[in-house]
Image (spheres, grey):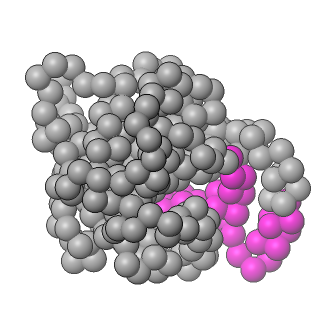
Amino acid sequence: MTQPTPLIDQHNLEIHDNLVHWNRKPVLQQIYREFYLQIARELDGRVPGPVVECGSGIGNLKSVMPDAIATDLFPNPWLDQTENVYALSFATTSVSSVILFDVFHHLEYPGAALQEIHRVLRPGGRLVLFEPGLGFLGRTALPLFHHESLGLGQEIAWTPPGGWHPNEAKYYAAQGNAWRIFMRGEHKEDILTCWAIKTCRPIVGLRWMMTGGFRGPLLANRFTLPPAQFLEKLMSLTPQWFAARLLVVLEKPTESR
């Protein structure tokens, strides 16, 4: 049986591959900037402290939030420090906000990661997740241009087995996990134990899909983008039906639950 590729090796290979595609697709950069601005608007600065991005990849969030601390499992020139989201180095109640952009669906044990993020956040601090959405567009197109499984038929393991260590995490991907948890309500009781769900917003993301993401074919250009933007606005009247992206904001209550 083939052994799973270590998490650190597989993700680092993907990141460097993504950087090549990113530099070739200015329109993808434009769409991502719009996503980053949506994230920034969810952080109003009421809670003092650093903003930390876990799983920063090629570090593009800094184009909109230059003061955010960019972290990942391994060092790269554009990152500020290395961090494992299951075992963060930040002191308890020292961080104002944590951002996970396309990271949540790589967490094999999301409950353990949420618990650790909850620890480092100050009361009133926020966790922002930006994930694949599984409306019609996402469910139909994501499997066509993205190699990661939607994972709809597999059980979500909320917590790791006894004796598990964060450094033992293997490569994992299930793009549908955030949709299942926050839109369908799977593991709802676990989430509501110590979080307030402030936002759960399906986003159509038609123009993003037309960029092909990092590896897919580029269908977006100056001729196709204007009608796509108009169609995207129409679809946004019922975004839960057409979503390809999902924005979730969790807040650590100011009083313990």
* In the image, residue 164 above or below residue 198: above
Task: Confirm whether residue 56 shows in the render.
Answer: no
Task: Confirm whether residue 213 shows in the render.
Answer: yes
Horizontal and vertical percent position of residue 1: 17, 22
Q: Locate residue 28: give its quadrant.
A: bottom right
In the visual, does 222 lie left or right of 233? left
Q: Locate residue 18: give its quadrant.
A: bottom left
Tell me if residue 154 is in the magenta stretch.
no
Residue visible at 35% across and 52% down in the picture: 121
| Image quarter in which the C terminus is found | top left
Residue visible at 54% across and 49% down in the picture: 249
Choose between 123 and 113: the one closer to the eye.
Answer: 123
Residue visible at 57% across and 41% down in the picture: 197
In the visual, does 166 lie left or right of 62? left
Residue visible at 20% across and 67% down in the picture: 81
Horizontal and vertical percent position of residue 139: 64, 37
Tell me if residue 221 is in the magenta stretch.
yes
**In the rendered structure, which segment of residues is drawn in magenta?**
202-231
In the visual, does 98 lie left or right of 36? left
In the visual, does 228 lie left or right of 82? right
Horizontal and vertical percent position of residue 193: 45, 28
Choose between 124 and 98: the one closer to the eye.
Answer: 124
